[in-house]
Image: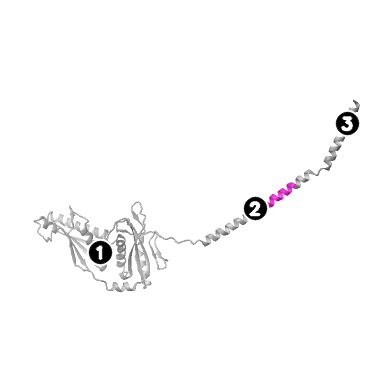
Amino acid sequence: MRNFFIAFFTFVVWSFFALWVYFLMLPNKQEITSNTAIVSIESVSDKTNDSSTLLIQNENKQSVATKQTIKNIKISEPTESFGLTARDAENNIVFEFKKGITFIKNDSYLDIPVSLNSFKILLKEYLLQHPEKEVHIISFYSATENFVTPNIGLQRGLQIKNMLINAGIDSTKIVVKSNISDISFSNENTYSNAIEFKFQLLNTKKVTKEIIPKEISRPSSITFSPKFSNTTILKTKKLQELLIGVTKILNQYPNAKITLIGHTDNSGTTEENYIQGLSYAKQLRWFLTNKSTVDKKRVRILSKGESQPIKSNRTPKGSLINKRIVLQFTY
């Protein structure tokens, strides 16, 4: 038994000795771990720096590319202005207003705000300063509007031409052009960019022709017998032809004016017939100034009532003939 304990003790001593020697011969683990950690951190740091450098380089490249792209992009000018504008032949703006001239769909009437009144003076002054130029009136209309002759765009443009002539601009330096366009009307069926102006070199061939124009009929008066619905004048083909004819005369003779004289039969009292004759004249004036290009300032109205019959009122036919409107021209 004693020998067993001696042997066991000896074994334990040698075991501890062997373990001590083993651990003594091993490398310093902490040092290896630390060094490894340092290397790893440095490696990660180097990679991070490399990634950061690449990222910065990429960002710089993108920045340069973006700047280059912006530099190469040509920013186009707006193709449409929503105010009243006048441009020269190089498309430079001579003058412009924030508001434009408005029209209602299927109507030749133009709504010109008071703030635009000076456009006529500006056009006149420019043409005086540039005698080699002429002004083109660009009048827009839509393909969805009613088909009439002349087209509704031209009718609107001719109204502006008459205004310019009345403002003292030489008619030979005014050109009207109607431009059919894809128009987006408002909820009220209006469009507020109806007219534009453009100055071009004077077409001397056109001027030569207009100096000696082909003279149209110059009547002293026209008698018009409307078709009535009770006491209201109806819009008929005959009335439309009258509007076109009167417009041509007034365009040919810018200084001409019209007096509309209403006549009736003797079916009412003298006073009633006078009022009725005046009503006929007012209705025709409305058609002339709203359904054609006639300027209201060139039209005055009178009534002769029943006082100047041309047929006997004893027959229905004679009574109907006496209900008429006479257009008297002064040149």
Is the residue marked by circle 3 packed among few (<14), some (14-19), or many (20+) residues within 10 Å? few
Closer to the observer: label 2 or label 1?
Answer: 2
The CA distance from mark 1 to mark 3 is 140 Å
Q: Taking 56 as reference, is 216 above or below it?
A: below
* Numbered badge on residue 9: 3
Q: Which residues are magenta?
A: 36-54
Residue wearing tag 2: 51
Q: Amino acid at mark 1?
A: Thr
Q: Residue furthest right?
A: 2
Q: Amino acid at mark 2?
A: Ser
Tell me where residue 201 appears, x and y as whole percent.
37, 71
Q: Residue at x 55, y 60 (%)?
A: 67
Q: Are marks 2 and 1 in contact (CB under 8 Å)?
A: no
Is 85 or 25 nearer to us in this picture? 25
Question: Mark 2 or mark 1, which has the lower sequence index?
Answer: 2
Q: Are marks 1 and 3 in contact (CB under 8 Å)?
A: no
How many numbered discs, if any? 3
Q: Secondary structure at mark 1?
A: helix
For the stretch drawn in magenta, the main secondary structure is: helix
Closer to the observer: label 1 or label 3?
Answer: 3
Residue wearing tag 1: 247
Left or right, 44 with reference to 83: right
